[in-house]
Amino acid sequence: MSFAYSSIRTRQEGGVLFATLDAGPLNLIGVDLVRDLVSLVDTLYTDPRDVRVVVIDSASPDFFSAHVDLTAVPQYTAEAAKAGGPGDASLGMFLHKLARVPVITIAKVRGRARGGGNELALACDMIFASRENAVFAQFETGTGALPGAGGIQHLTRRLGRTRAIEAIVGADDFDADLAERYGWINRALPDAELDGFVARLAQRIAGFPPEGAKAAKRAINDLTLADSAQVRSDSATFQALIALPESRERLDYLADRGLQTPGDLEQDLGKVLAEFRR
């Protein structure tokens, strides 16, 4: 048996599954990628096939995942809903399920991880990033919304109140060194050392008896993760705010400048957000 998906490349080495996001140059979190992530997570819950650690990275050197596909919010939400029960139709609730998956998960980040892409990384148990080219951001307030898929819950717990407000309300880009200093990620590593470090750590964990790691993760999750009601509330607020006229005006401005296409805007989104003028 093998893990086979259209937008995720996989390879398994012993107890470690390497899952490489490959959904176009920006790795937008859209219908295909959400469908494949839901399938992967469901398999890890029901038939993990000796997988003890999952490493999620990107085929793109410039984007771990730019953000959600803002042209397909209802469609990817419908795919995310397949991971949960009634009332759980949101990307946030799917990522909440990912955070509790009974294996250890590691996000290995090169390039930009913004919005929903950053929330995907935050749903993993650990984040290691390239010092030279990783960028993290929750940019939603720059469009009149808020992070709706776990960003508020994770970052407030990791960064503390004041730094979470800076990161979320400021909506700016954080390089890997600053993200490490704030506690956003585990470590920023030289790019040349990132792959080897993550592979060694993953294989080390995979070599331990799995029940201990599972029990430790459950206990830590119980102490640190948001409850379902908080995640649902953020998701509902995001859906309401993104539909407001001012939010649509800002998103249209960004679309006219090249949002969701490879180019300067997606490279420098944190800077461009502050340039909007009516």
Image (spheres, rainbow, N blue to C red):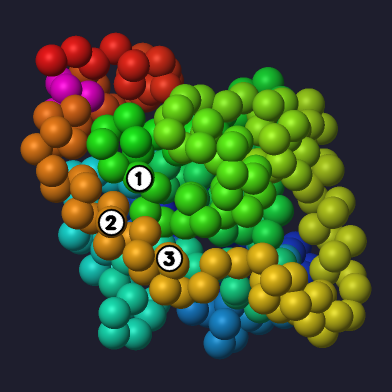
Quick one: label 3, few (<14), some, or many (20+) residues within 10 Å? many
- Label 2 and label 3: CA atoms lie apart by 10 Å
- Residue drawn at 34 percent across, 16 percent down: 274
Residue holding disc 2: 237
- Residue drawn at 12 percent across, 29 percent down: 249
- Residue drawn at 18 percent across, 59 percent down: 74
Count the labels in the image.
Answer: 3
Q: Is residue 250 left or right of residue 197?
A: left
| Magenta region | 252-256
Query: Mark 1 or mark 2: which comes first in sequence?
Result: 1
Marks 3 and 1: in contact by CB < 8 Å?
A: no
Q: Is residue 60 visible?
A: no
Q: Main secondary structure of the magenta part?
A: helix
| Quarter holding residue 220 | bottom right
Locate the N terminus by quadrant: bottom right
**In the structure shown, which secondary structural element does the residue marked by tag 1 occupy?**
loop
Residue holding disc 3: 231
Q: Position of residue 75 (x, y in %)?
A: 20, 60
**In the structure shown, which secondary structural element does the residue marked by tag 2 occupy?**
helix
Marks 2 and 1: in contact by CB < 8 Å?
A: yes
Q: Is residue 245 left or right of residue 51?
A: left
Instruction: Please tell me which residue lies in front, 202 or 140.
Output: 140
